Image: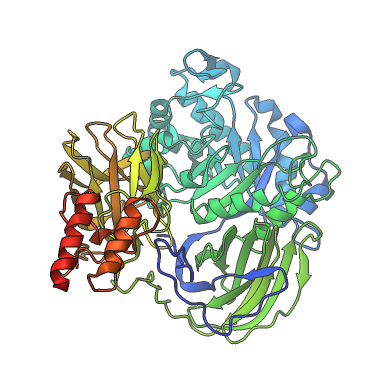
Amino acid sequence: MKFKKILSALLSCSIFATALTAGQSFIIETSFAASSCVIDTTEEFQTISGFGGINHPEWIGDLTDAQVQKAFGNGEDELGFSILRVYVNDDSNQWYKSVNVAKKAQELGATVFATPWNPPASMRINGDATLTGGRYQLDDSKFAEYAKHLNDYVKYVEEQGVDLYSISVQNEPDYASEWTYWSTDELTSFIAEYGDDVVSGTNAKLMSPESFQYKKDIYNSILNNSTALNNIDLFGTHFYGTTRSNMDFSALESCGKPIWMTEVYVPNSQTDSADRWPEAIQVSENIHNGLVVGNMSAYVWWYIRRNYGPMKEDGTISKRGYCMAQYSKFVRPGDVRIAVTEQPAENVYVSAYENDSNQLVVVAVNKGSEGYAQQFTVGSGETITNIDRYRTSADENLALTENLEASDSSFWAQLPAESVSTFVIDIEGEGTPVEKEEPPTDENGWYVHDTFEDSNCNWTGRGAASAEVSSSNPFKGNNSLSVSGRTSAWHGTSKELDTSIFEAGTAYSFSIRVRVPEDSTADRISLTLQYNNSEGETKYANIKSENAVPGEYVQLANTSYTLPAGADGMLVYVETPDNTTDFMIDEFIAAPDETVIDDTVSDTQLYGDVNDDKNLNADDVIMLQKWLVRSGTITNLSNADLNADNTINVFDLCILKRKVITDFS
């Protein structure tokens, strides 16, 4: 479960604001104050294995000794990498090429793992590009030989002094135009039948195949085969084109085995792109999403030395490299990710880690064009004894500011626009769990109340439909939202659920009023949830459906609806699933679980009191008359439908005149 923080001020249309704490006025010029960022040392997530990249002498040449030191050393102006990926050549006569750099990196404390691209020529057949897109395929009669080939590689490098941590089954079997394709069934069968043979007699662990884009079919197949799952020690994946919403995979995260992100470059491989700013910040953002959303234990770049990599061809560190180093130099192997307010302000992303030496590391990525004065609080209660900050920006590379001021468990720091800041925080004392803050509610006890009186409240047209505020036939007040132009049944109107309020796996009460026209043939109206599941697939779930009543508002209410566990990108939408009629919505309300939402118009409503002064008199007649000729407005439109026919016209004016005359007489 991700640790969430409620923003202190939210949009007034649908969410009820809370005041900022008095005294939080430490704002550097041209900057904005963000919500407090709370760190909780008592809530722990995955253990970090490290950060690194690949050395691939067969394709781009070997790293020099100085470059190995630059990459895997952790001194001044060094990257602090702790993981080296090496290539398993399909020709065993070339295996020696991976040994030299691996030994030197290992001497500097790095973990080494290996990945194969192809089986030997004697074990493969040419792929059928029209069917698989792969250049080669493993001959299905050669599974045992391929397992021995991988096992021989592990034993060879171990004999050369490389303590190989793991070896994977295949690089990108699902994107194999230049190497070997495997089907999901082939991979699972190979792992189940020969996985033990790959690492038999060695110290190495078996890593899963490494999907090019964290496609979930490979991993689900392994998870559903107990023998294959038992043979796998850790999972590997790549992040090419993988969006933040597709990084979360709850089934894999809960299987008890670590997940490594083993290859990516972000955002491109264009020549001389390594120093572009602020483009390089996307590296830090991608790392953040992998660790926080995907619960990855490792983050491994493609080529260590490349004109788009963390180290440029001349052996100096690039801007992309410094953005990696904001993590790799300070978040070390064995550190544990802990809970923290992930997004205390727009475009700010924060993660936190703890080691065994009573030290916290907090990394804050501000990718936005505005700076923030950010408060950080160790909410679990430990006392801060020292803070050092390292920052990379357009003009800084790991710039150090020592001994930032702190007050007990809290401190303030500037997060400049387009910058990455790492805070190394020494603490003392025992932590206690942080009491989670509940979302703010209004006087009714509701989280969200969309009345459409002043705006569309962030409801938009879905598909070809349009959604516009209308004064025609509101359920309450003066306005409702009119939905028209639907060309398919699924077209309607939708609204994203604010993640600062709505949490996957938690139950809420929902209610909305929907009206179809008097001449409509609509049978059903539905309030539906759209979301992405943990495998990144778009799913739909019904919150509530009812039979439509032409010309009348019908309430769609579910007092206890649980948002699906692992859901992301959640939005609610209204549709009539059987036809394309226009419709109106009003009074969307979301409240705590089991709240009974009664938003009906009061029985004591004073029909005709259009100026809402609690009296019927000539002033009401004048206001309604002006409104009918479009020369004025009405304060309370819901009081104007005196004959309850859902239409406001001259007949209502006549009734009002008679009521006023009768009351006056």
Where is 582 relative to 292, above or below? above
- The percent position of residue 526, horizontal first and vertical second, equals 23, 43
Residue at 52% over, 81% down: 21
- The percent position of residue 633, horizontal first and vertical second, equals 38, 58
**Extreme residue in the front direction:** 665
Closer to the camera in the image, 217 or 445: 445
Q: Can the viewer see residue 534?
A: no
Closer to the camera in the image, 616 or 44: 616
Q: Quadrant of the N terminus?
A: bottom left
Describe residue 548's horizontal placement relative to residue 174 as left or right: left
Residue at 73% over, 80% down: 403
Image-quadrant location for residue 222:
top left
Q: How is the image coloured?
A: rainbow
Describe residue 560's horizontal placement relative to residue 464 as left or right: left
Residue at 54% over, 19% down: 134
- The percent position of residue 321, horizontal first and vertical second, equals 74, 51
Closer to the camera in the image, 609 or 519: 609
Closer to the camera in the image, 332 or 470: 470
- The percent position of residue 387, horizontal first and vertical second, equals 67, 77
Image-quadrant location for residue 176:
top right
Where is 631 relative to 131, above or below? below
Q: How many marks?
A: 0
Describe residue 220's horizontal placement relative to residue 360 as left or right: left
Where is 293 relative to 619, above or below? above
Image-quadrant location for residue 37:
bottom right
Q: Quadrant of the C terminus?
A: bottom left
Q: Can the viewer see residue 595?
A: yes
